[in-house]
Structure formats: C-alpha cells, structure tokens
Amino acid sequence: MSWDTVALEWTDDVATVTVDRPDSLNALNRETLLALEEAVARTRDDEARAVVLTGAGEDAFVAGADIAAMQEMDTDEAQEYTVIGHRVFDAIQNHEAPVIAAVNGYAFGGGCELALASDLRVASENAVFGQTEIDLGIIPGWGGTQRLPRIVGDATARRMIFLGERLGADEAAEVGLVEEVVPGDDLEDTVAGIAEEISAKPRFAMSAAKEALNQAHESPESAGLAFERRLWSGLFGTHDQREGMEAFLEKRDPDFE
C-alpha cells in the first residue's frame, strides 16, 4: 500500500515510518493521520521488531496538527479529529515493538505528542519541542496533558503547556524529554543503530517488557486521555480558538478574550 503523505520503508526487521509533507512542515491533517495509522498497522501486521518514526526534510519532525484544517472545525468535527489522533498515538504507544522517534527540527503540538507516544526519543541538535496549543486558544489534544508530565515531571509540563514554552534539544535532554542529542548528520545512523540493536533482542521478551512498562500508567492515563479529548474538542467554536488559528495563519498576534 502507498500513501501520498507517509512513507514506509524496511531494513530487515526495522520499519521506518516517515511523515512526508515537508512543504507543510509535516503537519498532521486528517489524511496524514489516517495514512500514519495504516502504516503503523502495517508494521504491526508484518511483525516489525523495531519502528522508527521521523519527518521528511531538515526543518521539522512534525510541526503539529494542521492549523489550516482545524481553523473552521466545529465541536463535532474537532471531536472526530481528536479521536483519530488518539487512536493513532495509542496504537504507537501500545505497539508490540519499541518505537523510536528520530526528531529533526520542529516538534510542536501534535508533533511533540507523537514523540511522547514513542518509547524512545533521539533528537538532532536543531530539534525544538513545544506544546504550543495555548497560543491557538486550545490545549494539547492528542495525549500531551497526560504523557508529558509523566515524562518530564509536573512542573515542567505545566510551564510548557501554560506558557507554550519551547525547549531546544539540550534543554529537552535535561528534563528527560529526549534520551540522546546528536549532530543532525548523525541522527539517522544513530537511530538506525539503536533500532538494529533492539531488533536483535528476543521478540517476545521485548514485547512483554514494553507491555509491563506501559501497564504502570495505563488505567489512570486512559481516564485522563478521555477527559482530554472532551476538553480539547469543546474548545472549538470559541472566540479564542477561532482567533488563535486565524492569527497564526495571518501571521499576526492574536487578540484573545
């Protein structure tokens, strides 16, 4: 199967899934989310022993959800959009194989959440992370309010979400958001080496280890994710959501209520 906005490549038992919309900084619109879902399902069906997630080009891993596509959504459309995103990111988190995010460039909003759903995160020196939704009049809608504090701690998560703070690669490493920072030219080879090492480990033990680690947070997280979905979609149709996204697309400062 082929997709216009997502590429799937194999090296032995390692699958690499690339979001391929470089002209849009790999932003995740509905079509791309669904293609990503199919690609992730294919890696599961074909029994990948490790999965690499990355973005095309040098500017962005995934710059976020597609703001132009979100701007005119009503609450029902926003609810559908967040359900799809949660479904895809849950599939990544619950994949039998470890998933490694190779983060190059911007990882904002949904891009940061995509990295959070992965098991390991390796960043190039030019990577920048942020949960920047507050400046659009909304909140993280694909798991950020639940996964981010579990990874970086409550205080850092609150600063990132309340203030829309952006963290460079080294800052992200300091707070535990990424495990390793490497020069941009070394990112692909570094991640490939980690994936190859993982793929050589025993498949069933690796799957069991991942399931056991995920179990530590599964019950409370699922309730929090459901709550997040309701809050996120309920913000669509508000003045601040409309104004935030319109201002972004018009490249001006928003005038929030």
Image (spheres, helix red, strand yellow):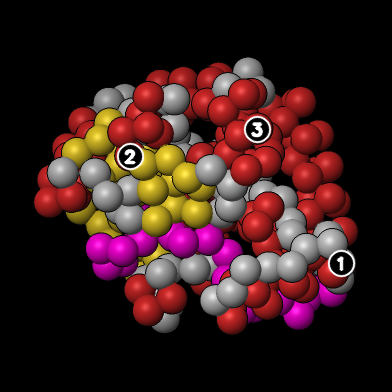
Residue under circle 3?
158
Disc 3 marks a residue whose amino acid type is Arg
Could you say where residue 242 lies in the image, as x and y percent from the top left?
77, 73
Q: Do the residues bearing badges 1 and 3 touch, measured as CB atoms within 8 Å?
A: no
Disc 1 marks a residue whose amino acid type is Thr
* SS of the residue under disc 1: loop
Residue 246 visible in the current orientation: yes
* SS of the residue under disc 3: helix
Give me the C-alpha separation between circle 1 and circle 3.
Answer: 23 Å
Residue 77 occupies quadrant: bottom right
Q: Do the residues bearing badges 2 and 3 touch, measured as CB atoms within 8 Å?
A: no
* SS of the residue under disc 2: helix
- How crowded pointer 2 is (Cα within 10 Å; few <14, some 14-19, many 20+) is rated as many
Residue under circle 2?
169
Q: Is residue 242 magenta?
A: no
Q: Of residues 35 and 221, which is closer to you in this image?
A: 221
Could you say where residue 210 lies in the image, as x and y percent from the top left?
48, 26
Residue 223 occupies quadrant: top right
Image point 78% across, 45% down: which residue?
228
Could you say where residue 4 lies in the image, as x and y percent from the top left?
41, 81
- Whether 224 is drawn above or below 73: the answer is above
Q: Which residues are magenta?
A: 53-79
Residue under circle 1?
238
Image point 78% across, 54% down: which residue?
232
